Image (spheres, rainbow, N blue to C red):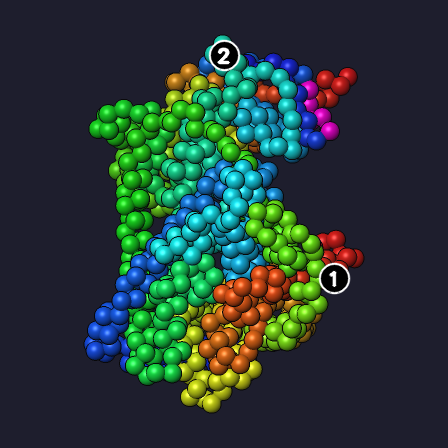
Amino acid sequence: MLELHNAALRLGDAPLFSDLSFAVAAGEVLTLMGPSGCGKSSLLAWLLGALPPAFSATGELWLGGQRVDGLPIEARQIGILFQDDLLFPHLSVLQNLLLAMPPGPAAQRRERAGQLLAEVGLAGLAERDPATLSGGQRARAGLLRALLAEPRALLLDEPFSKLDMALRGPYRQFVFAQLAARGIPAVLVTHDPGDVPPGGRVLQLADYQESAHV
Amino acid sequence: MGQCRQCLPGALAIAGMAVVFLPVLPGLLPLAQGLELAVWRGLLADAQTLVALRVTVISSVVSTLLALLLALLLTMALYPGPRWPALQRRLPALLAMPHAAFAIGAFFLLAPSGWLARWLAPLAGWDVPPDWQTVRDPYGLSLGLLLAVKEAIFLLWMLAAVLQEGALQRQMTLARSLGYGRWQVWWLCLLPQVLPRLGWPLLAVLAYGVSVVDVALILGPGSPPSLAVLAWRWLADPELALQARGAAASWLLLLVFLLLCGCGLLLWRLLRAAWRQPHGRRWAGASWQPRWLAWPLLGFCYLLALALLLWSLAGPWFFPAALPQSWTLAGWQQLDTAPLFTSLGLGLASAGIGLALVLLWLECGPPALSRWLYLPLILPALPLAAGQYHALLMAGLAGSGFGVVWSHLLWVVPYMLLTLYKPYLEFDTRMITLARSLGLSHWQRCWRIKWPLLLRPILAALAIGFAVSIAQYLPTLFAGGGRFATVTTEAVALSSGGNRRVLAVQAMLQLVLPMLMFALATLLGQWAGRHRQGWR
């Protein structure tokens, strides 16, 4: 369960939005939409703990009953998927996954990573250079890496927008299925209404701002 | 690049570069006498050789590794963050500081009778300078340490270019979201990507450390000196046997350089193996970020410049006093201005000719050959300067102003090319397409569109070419046959004497000349763009 209480975000002196609250249940995907510059990506950055210094934010972020908004990124256990897969180019696919996994006996970790790769249709690609993978394969490996870090919540920053149309639908379903299966709450930022999961809640950030002003 | 369809300008570009680079090769032939076995026996039998070799190995290894460590530590502490761009803005001024002036300033600051010791004297109860070897120690450690500080600035500048890419910053955020603190992210994710890109700059730092003469004369041990100084003295000796020994020492220098390169490569292999198996352990409490880390480096550089200024204005100044007993302008009033104007002339001529050659090359030269033009930056300078001297002797041009300018170009051109290459590459080619559709010829396009738009990088390249020329010591001595006294040769010559005020004045001049040129380049760039908001 991810909870946001009374969040307000400012860029310099200009308020972007204020008094925003929501809760996302385990396995649920909440979609944030709104025009460019409404602050949705900055909100995501704040949830992650990487708000650029030009912005300032107030509010409380709770994860599973623990307040985390004062913690640095690395202590929050919140994962992120960007537009680009950002697989580390100096590591193989397997090494990228091993980096994300919690420590443990080496053989066991490798076995588990290999098993998961096979489950998502990437069997046999473990030792490959990420740069030689197709866009769809890289996207799946990227998600797998985020999930292997065992995050308590996942942020999705337009992760489907760079994939071509044929890959988008299957990858979307794949992401939502993985999140649901693991019971991870997720916040999705997108411009494309087609990205919203079936029956998912949508928060229009610009509308929200307007209604808050009324 | 490569837009030029005519053969003539292309041939001209190649010919221009050939005139700068190729005559060095026949000039290296006389150094072949240093390959004879008997000469090597003489070299190794000389009691100075092995000690000098030790000085060279220690100082160049310390300077290269420590410069890398310093630059990386600072980067890790400040990037990404608001202090990183602030540090970047200060780098060009520090880079423009010539090595010799830096070394003299460091000497004034750190010598047993230097400024720092004078501050400490009341606390330590010193009436006379302490008997410490803070500079010119027989191992070349102080030489290595101070070179490291200067080269760290160069490496930071190179790192700044690498880190401009947004992808690295997003990778940092992503890796932290996986639970790693910023130091561990640097170690696991950024370093393996950044270090290979620092390979060439590191070679340049190593080559400089191995063959540096001016800084070694100021901060290195005296007898025996470093191998480069020894080789240079032998090469300049009238006795033929010693000249041959000098040639052999030049080859030894090259050999040491190659061996150290090999060691560096081996070290990199070992390091890479350590990254092979990510174990997944997260270091606790690894988000400590010492943002103040830049201040010791910057403070040291500012302090040594201040020490130069102070000494250039000091009257009598006896040891334990923290400040001079009285002030005087005598050093500046009695200044011999001839070296100043010689430096100015050589610098302007080299930068001007260098710019013409580099622009012609970028416009018409074959891009595939560009990488060869950087070679002088990653080779020890001593054999090259000696080769230039022999080439000038053969052409009957040794000791001429033309010869000195030509000798500077071998280092001026690659640095100018390095500065202009990227802006040229990134130039929006649509502008050129547009200009062609308006019917402008190739040279009209350059004069009226491309070069005006690239004015700022061009001015920066001019300033850098000028600074490189001002800082040249070995080529000026070799090619000039000792007849050209510049602020650099004067400063180094005075550094062994006793008159600190005169020395400080020359070092200040050496420091101020390139700074003025950088300031001028910046001001001109701003002035040119004063009515054009989209062009700044």
Q: Residues within 10 Å of mark 2 (few under 14, many from 20)?
A: few
Give the labeled residue for mark 1.
B528
Where B251 sits versus A38, above or below? Answer: below
Q: Magenta segment, principal secondary structure?
A: strand
What amino acid does circle 1 point to?
Answer: Ala
Which image quarter: residue A104? top left
- Residue B277: x and y in percent read 28, 36
Q: CA distance from mark 1 to mark 2?
A: 57 Å
Task: Classify residue B24 as left or right of residue B449.
Answer: left
- Residue A112: x and y in percent read 27, 26
Chain under numbered label 2: A
Where B65 sits versus B391, above or below? Answer: above
Do tag 1 and tag 2 residues touch (Cβ < 8 Å)? no
Q: Is residue B7 magenta?
A: no
Tag shown at residue B96: none
Q: Is residue B359 visible?
A: no
What amino acid does circle 2 point to?
Answer: Gln
Q: Residue at x 56, y 40 (%)?
A: B122
Closest to the observer: B419 or B401?
Answer: B401
SS at mark 2 in the image: strand
Q: Residues within 10 Å of mark 1 (few under 14, many from 20)?
A: some
Q: Residue at x 35, y 46 (%)?
A: A132
- Residue A98: x and y in percent read 32, 31
Closest to the observer: B125 or B469?
Answer: B125
Q: Which residues are magenta?
A: A13-18
- Residue B51: x and y in percent read 30, 61
Tag shown at residue A66: 2
Residue furthest out toward the front: B127
Task: Classify residue B283 as left or right of residue B397.
Answer: left
